Each structure stands twice: as C-alpha cells, then as structure tokens.
Amino acid sequence: MTDALPDLDRIDLKILNALQEDGRISNLKLAESVALSPTAVLARVARLTKDNYILGYEARLNPLKLGAGMLVFVEVLLDKTTTHLFEEFKAAVQVRPEILECHLVAGGFDYLLKTRMADMGAYRQFAGTVLWQLPGVRETRTYAVMEEVKNSTHLPLF
C-alpha cells in the first residue's frame, strides 16, 4: 500500500494503525511501539494531522446503553435531481443528530442514510416528522438491522 501512498512510509503506517487501535495511546507508548523517539513521533503525528491523514479523535459510545440501540438504514429517492435540491437536502440532513451518516450514491436511489433510534416507535415518529419532511423526498425504503455482524471504523493499512 505504500506505493499507493507515496507520502507515507512504513513508520507512518504503523503510527496510523496504532492510533486506530487506541486513539488515547500516550506519545511515549506510541514511540516505543514504532521504535522512534517521542519527539520524532510527535512531529510525525502533527504532520499526519496537518496533512489530513488523521481527521480527529473521538470516543466510541455504546448505543444500547444510551437509548439508541436500533440501527436503521434508509434509501432516499428525491423527486428531482437538481443541484439546488441536493444542496437543500444536504443542509437539512446536517442538523439532524439521528442521522449518523448520509451518502449520495449511484444506483436506483439518491441517498443512503444511517440512523439510530431507541426502537421502532421512535423510528416511526422520526420518519413522519423528519425523514418524509426533508426537502425533495419522494420515496424511502427502510432497513431495520436485526444484528450488527461487523461494525468498524478501522481502515486496512498495509
């Protein structure tokens, strides 16, 4: 993969992998794991952040413990595909905390949404008061997840 990522060397990839595993790893432990000085590692992490290889750090929360245990994917088909409507839809989605992800996709519909709710009743409420009121929505298809088989944010780095 380093051929595909000429700006990254083997140590950069090790740093990125270690940070994917534990974003709270101390600089000292990170330096030990890649066999560099803490100063050199700090400089590399700063460069990787500045160059947008590292976008940020966050805690992964347990949705079951926080009343958002139902994962729902939604296909959204807009009634028109104009630049203006796409922009309106994107702006409306940005302010809805229930919508975790929104992707413009190629295929038989326009957007794929990832949402989290407490239960089906909460989703029904969301669909009626938010989802179907989003700009330009003509049709939706809902896929309630019965079991999360894999859920990862880790990118494969070789």
Image (spheres, rainbow, N blue to C red):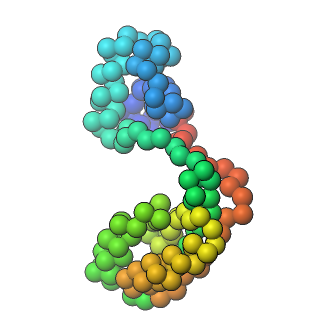
State which quarter of the image contains the C terminus.
top right
For image coordinates 36% across by 19% down, the residue present is 41
Does 153 appear above or below 76?
A: above
For image coordinates 54% across by 81% down, the residue present is 140
* Residue 62 at least partly seen: yes
Can you tell which quarter of the image residue 12 is in? top left
User: How many numbered markers are drawn?
Assistant: 0
Can you tell which quarter of the image residue 5 is in? top left
The answer to whether 44 appears left or right of 155 in the picture is left
**Residue closer to the observer: 13 or 25:** 25
Q: Position of residue 153 (x, y in %)?
A: 53, 45
The answer to whether 100 appears left or right of 117 in the picture is left
Q: Position of residue 116 (x, y in %)?
A: 55, 63
Q: Position of residue 60 (x, y in %)?
A: 52, 43
Does 122 appear above or below 40?
A: below
**Residue closer to the observer: 136 or 8:** 136
For image coordinates 43% across by 41% down, the residue present is 58
Q: Position of residue 34 (x, y in %)?
A: 47, 17
For image coordinates 34% across by 32% down, the residue present is 48
* Residue 77 at least partly seen: no
